[in-house]
Image: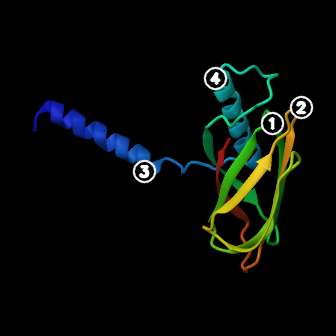
Amino acid sequence: MTHFKRILLGCLALVLATALSAPAARADSLHRALKHIAGDIKDKRRAQGLADDVKPKKPLGSSKTVSFKLAMKDGVGQDSDSEYCFGYTLKCVAVVRKPINTFSGEVSSSGGGRVVFKDMKSGTPLHVTLQTDFLGDTTFKVHLRAQDEPYPHEIKVHLTCSY
């Protein structure tokens, strides 16, 4: 085996060992997930030359996918956070990825839009349309209740929002 092949194989082994021992990517909190979405909206507006004080007249034609974890206690998880989203309508699809369970709950925004759901199994997409405020931050709220014991300590939610 040539010296070059040995170096190449050694590099490949090092890359594989590093990849296999690296910790799994940690899901963000609801706060970080909403911050990513709000930041993307701001970046897309600037890329289109829209000033911050101009109310949206049409959707940006963009979307962002994020994941977050929601802590659960005795089968109940809730969180809320506020972000500025320039008055855009967020058309979102949320999916509980882990663990397998059946959930009931509510998702809402202070700008308008509320979805109440019941008996939704993990992996089932939940479609949510949420309005955001133009004149200030919008508060987003999530409240979930796991129905099947043993109750999870946390859930992982995959969220895609178009705006």
Residue located at (72% from left, 45% from top): 90
Circles 1 and 4 in contact, beta carbons < 8 Å: no
Picture coordinates of residue 82, whole percent (x, y) = 84, 41
- Amino acid type of the residue that numbered disc 2 sits on in the rendered structure: Leu
Q: Considering only order in the chain, which callout, 3 or 2, is on the residue closer to the N terminus?
A: 3
- The number of numbered discs placed on residues in the rendered structure image is 4
Label 1 – label 4 distance at C-alpha: 16 Å
Other-residue count near label 3 (Cα within 10 Å), few / some / many at <14 / 14–19 / ≥20: few
What residue does disc 1 label? Answer: 87
Q: Secondary structure at mark 3?
A: helix
Q: Considering only order in the chain, which callout, 3 or 4, is on the residue closer to the N terminus?
A: 3
- Amino acid type of the residue that numbered disc 3 sits on in the rendered structure: Leu
User: Is residue 144 in view from this perspective?
Assistant: no
Q: Considering only order in the chain, which callout, 4 or 1, is on the residue closer to the N terminus?
A: 4
Q: Secondary structure at mark 2?
A: loop
Circles 4 and 2 in contact, beta carbons < 8 Å: no
Label 2 – label 3 distance at C-alpha: 47 Å
What residue does disc 2 label? Answer: 135
Give the answer, above or below, for where 11 lies relative to 48. Answer: below
Residue located at (79% from left, 33% from top): 86
Q: Looking at the rendering, which quadrant does residue 2 occupy? A: top left
Q: Is residue 129 left or right of residue 66?
A: right
Question: What is the residue that sits farthest to the left in this orientation?
Answer: 1
Label 2 – label 1 distance at C-alpha: 8 Å
Other-residue count near label 4 (Cα within 10 Å), few / some / many at <14 / 14–19 / ≥20: few
What residue does disc 4 label? Answer: 48
Circles 2 and 1 in contact, beta carbons < 8 Å: yes
- Amino acid type of the residue that numbered disc 4 sits on in the rendered structure: Gln
Give the answer, above or below, for where 120 lies relative to 155. Answer: below
Q: Secondary structure at mark 1?
A: loop
